[in-house]
Image: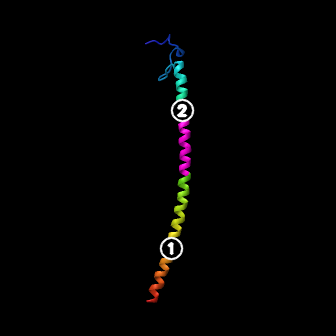
Amino acid sequence: MEFDNFVAEDSPGWGITSPKSGDIVRDAIKKERVLKEIIAYQEDLRAMLSKVDTVQKEVDKLVSGNETLQMYIDNLTVQMAKRR
């Protein structure tokens, strides 16, 4: 095997195809559409994360309230037990 006449510029690299001019435009439009979808999904995720944070804060408040109520119930139970 001899490669004396081989010129790298004559052949595209592995996996690289020579795109046709119509393909470039179509690919650019497709890429733009995909990027817009990604941006929309990112915005949706930000909104969901914000909602999750809000709900988590509400859950934390409810847990704190439940703990306070449980302490109150425990204290009442102890006081009732002492009276008997």
- Residue 66 image point, x, y percent: 50, 70
Q: Residue at x 55, y 55 (%)?
A: 53
Q: Is residue 37 magenta?
A: yes
* Residue type of the residue flagged with mark 1: Leu
Q: Residue at x 53, y 68 (%)?
A: 64
33 vs 63, nearest the viewer: 33
- Residue 50 image point, x, y percent: 56, 52
Residue holding disc 2? 33
Dominant secondary structure (helix, strand or loop) of the stretch shown in magenta: helix
- Quadrant holding the N terminus: top left
Q: Earlier in the sequence, mark 1 or mark 2?
A: 2
Determine whether the residue tagged by mark 2 lies in a helix, strand or loop. helix
- Quadrant holding the C terminus: bottom left
Mark carried by residue 69: 1
Q: Which residues are magenta?
A: 35-49
* Residue type of the residue flagged with mark 2: Arg
- Residue 63 image point, x, y percent: 51, 66
